[in-house]
Image (spheres, helix red, strand yellow):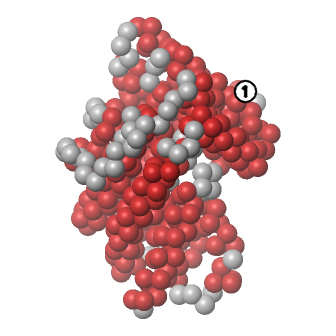
Amino acid sequence: MFLDVLIFMLLGILVGTLTGLMPGIHPNTVFVCMISMIALMGSAPTILLLVFIMALAVSNTFVDFLPSIIFGAPDPSTALSVLPGHKLLLEGRGHEAIMLTVMGGLGVAVLTFLTMPLLIHIIPQVYPVIRPVLHILLIFVVVWMIATEKDWRGRVSAMVVFLLSGMFGVVSLNAFASGTMLFPSLTGLFALSTLLVSFYTRSVIPHQDRTTEIPGDHRKGILIGWVAGWFAGMLPGVGAAQAGVLAAQSLRASTREFITALGGINTSNIMFTFIMFYVIGRTRSGAVWAISQLVDSITLWDMALMMLVGITTCFVSAIVTIGIARVLLNQIRRINYSTMSLAVMVLLVFMVLVLSGPWGMLAVLTGTFMGLLSILFRVKRSHLMGYLILPTILYFSGLSPMLMASVGI
């Protein structure tokens, strides 16, 4: 049995690594295919399929930072990392950016594993209290984000950027399937706008310092990632990006702490969603949905095994991620950065066209315009997360159906 578990865990890590390296290809795609082919996998014990799902989901949360930081190609859960991660890359600190995300993932995994008994006890009590007031918490965070701009012009510009991107999110996510619109919209908001500026300013990638140790205290970043992942895992409609903004603004995170937190949010989110399924039977991720199609519930033994697989996967994936990052960063200086930026932009547009069609092209163009607008206004790019935050506020406040009916969507 041990050998079987090991094989399925390594297979999950392999598939999670491949999906993490390919922007636009989400693990949920693999889960849907797996469930649709379940008849062909009937000979495999269910527990081994659970191990595969856990390993795939967790490993993906480590590797999917590589395309966003190195090439500027975001996944919905890593979009914010394009900004500080890209900046560190252009400062010759790409290794540091990757190491920070890895430390965040490892830190929250250990913290989640150690606190699992406590979480199993308090989640049923905390969940009913937080959910009714989440929109108020998000409104508070948005006001705080805008107030942190340096002057009144910056605050007005930030409000404009937030509202425009927010209405873009409200319309696109309600008029179309969110899975269709997320990739093109976030690609425009964060990737293409960043790559366009880098292309026209003729940025040059400097020598990348091969960091093996990142000095400083990372406990705050890990704690932010853990708390944010907890919110994202508990509440429907709240993704890792919204939770990251919420926690980072509330705890005043520095750039390095923010990158560490982003590295931890997705990992903790995945682990929390498994705990949520065990405690209250709710599905909060594609991975848990896949499990719910295999079993009605999981036992404490299943939960313990998956958590053990999860934390083991974290350490293996950390080594794999750092190894791949070193290869990519060592090779990237041999390529003209302007040529690479253009190639990545062409690839992203092609993938948007293939995966989302003509409406995806409209979304990527709109998102790119808004991303450039935030750069022109010289405000924090995190205000572009209004694309996800405003729809979430409307959803939890109960105003979304009324607003959609008023505009005929």
Query: Does residue 295 sit above or below 276 in this rendering?
Result: below
User: What amino acid type should be assigned to the residue bearing mark 1?
Assistant: Val
Residue 272, horizontal then vertical, whole percent: 39, 59
Observer-nearest residue: 96 or 242? Answer: 96
Query: Does residue 287 sit above or below 82 in this rendering?
Result: below
- Residue 108, image quadrant: bottom left
Residue to which mark 1 is pinned = 407
**Mark 1 surroundings within 10 Å by alpha-carbon count, few (fewer than 14), some (14 through 19), many (20 or more):** few
Residue 7, horizontal then vertical, whole percent: 47, 83
> From this viewpoint, which residue is outermost toward the right?
358
Quadrant of the drawing holding the N terminus: bottom left
Quadrant of the drawing holding the C terminus: top right
Query: Does residue 122 sit above or below 338 in this rendering?
Result: below
Residue 373, horizontal then vertical, whole percent: 58, 19
- Residue 65 visible from this viewpoint: no
- Residue 200, image quadrant: top right
